[in-house]
Image (cartoon, grey):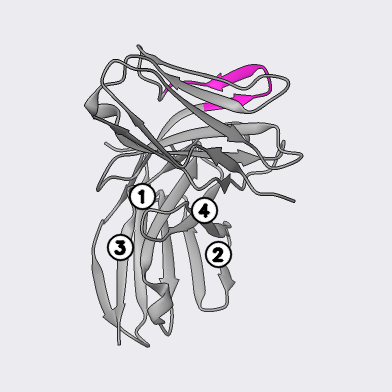
Amino acid sequence: NAGVMQNPRHLVRRRGQEARLRCSPMKGHSHVYWYRQLPEEGLKFMVYLQKENIIDESGMPKERFSAEFPKEGPSILRIQQVVRGDSAAYFCASSPLGNEKLFFGSGTQLSVL
Amino acid sequence: RKEVEQDPGPFNVPEGATVAFNCTYSNSASQSFFWYRQDCRKEPKLLMSVYSSGNEDGRFTAQLNRASQYISLLIRDSKLSDSATYLCVVRYGSSNTGKLIFGQGTTLQVKP
């Protein structure tokens, strides 16, 4: 049973470009979480999704950021018109329905030049 | 006030020492609590859940005080391999679909 898969591991973008981060949850997991970790800081909650449904997006910036978890395929975190302040590690985690434990992917390190 | 608050440390202890970390949370309706471990900013991994009556897993003991909204983690007989950042995690609210909020972490360095 493969773990949570995130890709790419490293993503470099220039200011103004778009960044797409992908997350494939563990088999059988229907809930996905996205977290952001800035240098020297803790993990900040961004969004919590179920298949085709956003459960809680209270941690998402109001502009430029969006997330989806379609019926088929991975969850996508999309950042439009990236700025230097978006540079961070973005971690995805999944959990089975009703289970409280999170299983994390290895993260995507986004660097904005 | 932060939703989950931890002393960032670092805690520098010799091998074999006993060390305790504390965590406070702001949402009194929260029902689920965990400790995760993060090594060198890699992906966090679940260390243990925290139960109302307190629970132990080998050298690790977790305690919950609902009245004070306080969680603790005790590590006995510290090993070099225990060096890591320990993250206190609280499920927001009473629902089992509430978001999981992480504290900023407490860094432990175990020295030979």
Q: Percent position (x, y) of residue B42?
A: 43, 54
Earlier residue among tags 1 and 2: 1
Q: Is residue A88 above or below residue B75?
A: above
What amino acid is labelled 2 in the image?
Gly
Give the numbered dot on residue B54: 2
Residue carrying label 3 = B107
Residue A45 belongs to magenta span: no
Q: Nearer the viewer, residue A19 or B44?
A: A19
Between residues B70 and A79, which one lies in front from this camera angle?
A79
**Magenta residue check for A50:** yes
Chain containing the residue with disc 1: B
Magenta residues, as a range?
A48-58
Q: CA distance from mark 3 to mark 4?
A: 16 Å
Q: Is there a contact, CB below 8 Å, between mark 3 and mark 1?
A: no
Cα separation between marks 4 and 2: 12 Å
- Residue annotated with mark 4: B34
| Image quarter of residue A35 | top left
- Mark earlier in primary sequence (4, 2): 4
